[in-house]
Amino acid sequence: MRTAIRLLTAASFAATLGFASSASAYTVYVSNEKDNTISIIDSTTLKVTDTIAVGQRPRGILLTNDGKYLLICASDDDTVQVFDVETKQVIRELPSGPDPELFVLHPSGNPLYIANEDDNLVTVVDIVDNKVLAEIPVGVEPEGMGISPDGKVLVNTSETTNMAHFIDTATNEIFDNLLVDSRPRFAEFNQDGEKLWVTSEIGGTVAVIDAKTRKMITKISFEVPGVQPEAIQPVGLRVTKDGSRAFVALGPSNRVAVINGETHEVEKYLLVGQRVWQLAFTPDEKMLFTSNGVSNDISVIDTEKLRVIKSIGVGRFPWGVAISKE
Amino acid sequence: MISITKVAKPAVRPADETALRDDTSSPGSGCSAALRKLLSALAFSALLTPATLHSAAAQDSQEVSIAYLSQIVERPPKLSNLDIPPEDEGLAGGLLSIKDNNTTGRFMKQAYTLKHVEVPADGDVLAAFDALRAEGLQHIVLNVPADALLQMADRAKGEEVMLFNAGARDDRLRSADCRANVLHITPSRAMLADALAQFLAWKRWRNWFLVIGRRDGDALFGDAIKRAAKRFGAKIVAEKRWDYGPDARRTAQSEVPAFTQDADYDVLIVADEIGEFGEYLAYRTWDPRPIAGTQGLTPTTWHRTHEQWGAAQLQSRFLKTNGRFMAPLDYHVWAAIRAIGEGATRTQSTAFSDIQNYIRGDDFELAGFKGQKLTFRAWNGQLRQPILLTAARALVSASPQQGFLHERSLLDTMGLDAPESECRFE
């Protein structure tokens, strides 16, 4: 009965906001770290349509450029699984190196760059030929992975070394390092390739870096009234295609910060679920989905109104979010 | 696979240390001679690793030399063959930290080395300390008793030497007996007791039966528990000294019920730091009551069940290297050496004063797998850190608990806060 009412509310809510009529239907994938499953959400109804068992401790997930496969870091199985979105089955595994956590695809769609936390390596994998092309030694506990839009520069952040490592994708060698605040978790380039954003979880800051000179432009701090400073822990980050805004997940402060892409000022804090971790835009950037690890749900943010419009219950410890291109 | 012969010229002179280690007779440590030899060989080969790494990178790198000096005066009694205390406890954490620092050091052209000296219980630990200073070692991590630590601090006064206390939990070192050249990585007894008290207050288990063992440390832990009771609104409804001798295995079933009779309490708190009798109290109390303190629900800095906040990664790196779980002492030595590493990395300098100024400055932050940055208290040099509350095979909670507020940092609700500490650095 209660579910029925909730469904009704959700449906009317979605209808009011116009998603049902105007927006395309995207498929949202969420990895549930402690349930060893992937939840599949329909972006029109904002309902979970399926829950699929996958490998152990699924964390980072992404869709291949052709949209046919979801790649899943099954950390405790030491592998990256290839999930066919059509048949909803894991069809093969990629050689990933131990304990894969996060990864990024080359803009051309291949190769895949994987952070291996346990071995201080970035593994470069050809996802068509299913083979390891290179292993790049980096700092202690590599995690964040960003790649420049032209595919020439790969950035890896190492959590205990506290650096952003700049890697030349032609040679697979580090050509520069930049110290950032403690426990850098995530790296993302602007679409124009000018800026690089790096979040520092324990440092509580976001570094905005000039991607060309590799110098720090500014360091953004956060302050939420009534929230202990130590609870503000930036993790996932996404920048809009036009670079006008960045959204940062602030972990156990249960907030997503909205940052002006030009001035780097914080415009707003949005209250979401507990321990907000990773973020993903729908391709039209009208909605932002956040994984909330402790409250076991997904918050959906309307990016125009800057409002949280819905929370969707998923599995235990939702970690990664990926959204289909159409 | 141990291949000692492969390494030709170790730079850390392991011969002396191995000799010291072999002399260290640990009565009742439970290892057969063969196992002890193996452990010693393991430690020996482990010691060489950073030196070897270092020699490869030495040409163009600046060096940070760190010492780890330990003297274990009282080893836990051998009450069962359950847990054999690892011979390299502390050292293994130090070596992992050196490895972590060297991975970062590759990018900074900095190289870290560790010299370990273990002094037997009846050995001259001050002489060993003087020898390290004479060799020019400036960052010295210590696992020694409080009195020895104070003498060392006084000997090194005015020199460019910083001491990192990884083992002595005495509150007085953070209060009247504090020293400006000592930073405390290990929490004080007051911090541990407060961490436990906050959890018990949250549970509303306010009436405590306190059992104190016969050793000095037990009395001090008992004092910390009494202080914590006052701070967090609990009441010690009964206090007894455990005087039944060193081995209660066969007698506990008859002794403990009588010992715990005639009191109305919520939780029995035991102060038995060395582990003589505390494990034998559970299930044997007159009334069915939980046990907490040095046994039962235990406040600690590190535990094998701790996997939150990225800790799984440190656990797995440690386990892979050492074939055993990380112990609290390993974590303390690891954190001390990481703090030194942060100092060198952030200032991009290996100069003692640069490293020190950074560690003691406002910008210092250490990511220690505790969900928030670890920093030092300016008033007594104590590292602030969340405290885990653990059962044998489960992490029960982590303090500070919600609702205990502080103007500066919630972590300062545990241990000696600025107004309470009698520490005044000259």
Image (cartoon, coloured by chain):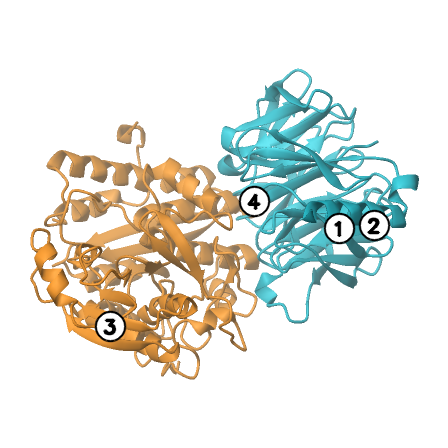
Chain colours: A cyan, B orange
Residue A136, image x, y percentages: 58, 32
Q: Residues within 10 Å of mark 4 (few under 14, many from 20)?
A: some
Please state the total of marks drawn on the protein image: 4
C-alpha span from label 4 to label 3: 61 Å
Vertical side of A19 occupied by A150: above or below: above
Q: Amino acid at mark 1?
A: Lys
Label 1 sits on residue: A310
Work out whether residue A213 can be spotted. no
The answer to whether dots 2 and 3 both sit on one chain is no
| Image quadrant occupied by the C terminus of chain A | top right
Label 4 sits on residue: B107
The answer to whether dots 2 and 1 both sit on one chain is yes
Residue at x 28%, y 60% (from the top left corner): B290
In the image, is B317 to the left or to the right of A136?
A: left
For mark 2, give the secondary structure.
Answer: helix
Circle nearer the N terminus (4, 3): 4
Q: Nearer the viewer, residue B166 or A241?
A: A241
Residue at x 52%, y 71% (from the top left corner): B409
Label 3 sits on residue: B264
Q: Are marks 2 and 1 in contact (CB under 8 Å)?
A: yes
Vertical side of B103 occupied by B133: above or below: below
In the image, is A147 to the left or to the right of B140?
A: right
Q: Amino acid at mark 2?
A: Phe
For mark 4, give the secondary structure.
Answer: helix
Q: Amino acid at mark 4?
A: Phe
C-alpha span from label 1 to label 3: 51 Å
Which chain does tag 1 point to?
A: A
C-alpha span from label 2 to label 3: 57 Å
C-alpha span from label 1 to label 4: 45 Å
